[in-house]
Amino acid sequence: MNRLLVDGTNLILQLALDAAAEKQRASAHNLANVNTPNFKRQEVSFEKKLKEALFSAPKLKLTKTHEKHLPRELKLSDLQHEVVTDHSTSMRNDGNNVDIDREMVLLTMNQMHFNAVTQVLNSRYSTLRYILHEGRR
């Protein structure tokens, strides 16, 4: 595929959209089970992994002598969101830990995040489209 379409920024934006979609599903699942006894809410972990991948500098440069001897370096394409279950809290006597107000705030924040990432991605593709079309004249 063309390098202009699949660069590091576009890959990060795609991964962020995937994580936001999964966050939406997790929040909807949590809200659907608000009255289920002993249900534990789920959340999606992505931002911490992304931050670590982007800003952590390798402390020691390793040289591979064999493909299977040393673990390979972390690549952005290897980053994936992770769904984790929160067993640490309990909101009610029946063991359920879903807080409707919190879930609604998380849904709203996630929607705003999704919209922002979509706008940035659309802007990048619009610029690329402009360059391609103006280059033909």
Image (cartoon, grey):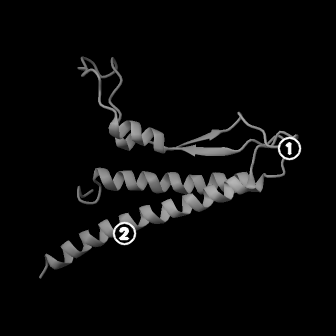
x then y, percent, for residue 128 = 24, 69
Q: Quarter holding the N terminus?
A: bottom left
x then y, percent, for residue 92 = 84, 43
Of 78 and 121, the residue lying toward us: 121
The residues tagged by marks 2 and 1 sit, at their Cα atoms, a distance apart of 43 Å
- The crowding category of the residue bearing disc 1, from other C-alpha atoms within 10 Å (few below 14, some 14 to 19, many at least 20), is few
x then y, percent, for residue 75 = 34, 38
Considering only vertical position in the picture, is 72 above or below 12?
Answer: above
Considering only vertical position in the picture, is 132 above or below 121?
Answer: below
Residue at the (20%, 78%) spot, across then down: 133
Residue at the (71%, 34%) spot, across then down: 87
Residue at the (33%, 37%) spot, across then down: 55
Amino acid type for the residue under numbered disc 1: Pro
Residue at the (40%, 41%) spot, across then down: 51
Q: Is residue 123 left or right of residue 108?
A: left
Of 74 and 89, the residue lying toward us: 89
Q: Quarter holding the C terminus?
A: bottom left
Amino acid type for the residue under numbered disc 2: Asn
x then y, percent, for residue 90 = 78, 39
Q: Residue lying furthest right in this view? A: 93
Q: Is residue 94 left or right of residue 69?
A: right
Q: Which residue is disc 1 drawn over?
A: 37
Q: Is residue 15 left or right of residue 95?
A: left
Q: Describe the element under mark 2 as helix, strand or loop.
A: helix
Q: Which residue is disc 2 drawn over?
A: 122
Based on the displayed image, in which of its 4 quarters is residue 43 positioned? top right
Q: Is residue 12 left or right of residue 45?
A: left
Q: Describe the element under mark 1 as helix, strand or loop.
A: loop
